Amino acid sequence: MAIAPGPATPYRRVLLKLSGEALMGPRQYGIDPEVSRDIAAQVTRARQDGAQVAIVVGGGNIFRGLSAAASGMDRATADYMGMLATVMNGLAIQDALEQAGTPTRVMSAIAMNEVCEPYIRRRAVHHLERGLVVVMVAGTGNPYFTTDTAATLRAVEVGAEVILKATRVDGVYDADPEKEPGATRYSRISYGDLLANRLEALDATAVSLAMDNEMPIVVFDMTEPGNIVRAVRGEPIGTLIAGEVS
């Protein structure tokens, strides 16, 4: 049975983008099981609130293709290795969700039938309509595209109403807050201003795709307890990236 929006969420379907780095918690590498369990508990609550949830996960906690390419590795090879890292993260998220009692499917843009389903848009939509959480891994299946772009593409494909980008930063700033203590956080910024000011919250391809399809994006800090549920409920947290600011 399809899950309809409940009174606690304004959204019928959301796409949650999880950065790989956020899965590390206090660690320097890999996946913190406590973080996975917390994500699973919050996604389960969001599903109980009535939202259909798709997830795209990054792989930076295990391998960053762009960094490896900058060190001299062939870019395409490095990107494929990064895609495989997202599969490991996706399987960890699936395990945590199913231990929390939430049925989940992992769908990969790179075929690996022994461990997950191939990504097929209509099948993904069918899973979501049945109330399953769908974890989409391996990016777009192509090198030279980030998982931010993959998240935007998948959100448009499955008809999500918003992209919720969960990171370790509480929104979009006018400068790097780790380097500039006086940096100002935006509560809302337009796609055009984000691109014009070369702010690095998302890559330009992802922002352009979102702008062309009028797909709003909320960037928020997932390390703050309960923020995933708050984002799904439409509470004003982080930074909203959308059309022109009136």
Image: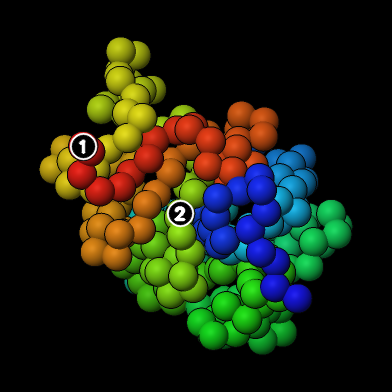
Looking at the rendered structure, the kind of residue marked 1 is Ser
Q: Quadrant of the C terminus?
A: top left
* Residue 130, percent from left and from top: 71, 75
Pointer 2 with pointer 1, Cβ within 8 A: no
Asked whether residue 172 is in view, the answer is no
**Disc 2 versus disc 1: distance between alpha carbons?**
21 Å
Q: Give the colour scheme shown.
A: rainbow
Classify residue 16 as left or right of residue 218: right
Question: In the displayed image of the protein, which residue is found farthest to the top?
Answer: 182
Q: Residue at x 52, y 59 (%)?
A: 15
Classify residue 64 as left or right of residue 211: right
Q: Residue at x 30, y 20 (%)?
A: 184
Classify residue 21 as left or right of residue 79: right
The residue to which callout 1 is attached is 246
**237, 141: nearer the viewer:** 237
- Quadrant location of residue 151? bottom left
- Crowding at dot 2, Cα within 10 Å, few <14 / some 14-19 / many 20+, comes out as many
Q: Nearer the viewer, mark 2 or mark 1?
A: 1
Classify residue 20 as left or right of residue 30: left
Looking at the rendered structure, the kind of residue marked 2 is Ile
For residue 141, above or below residue 150:
below
The residue to which callout 2 is attached is 163
Q: Residue at x 35, y 58 (%)?
A: 215
For label 2, the SS is: strand
For residue 89, above or below residue 172:
below
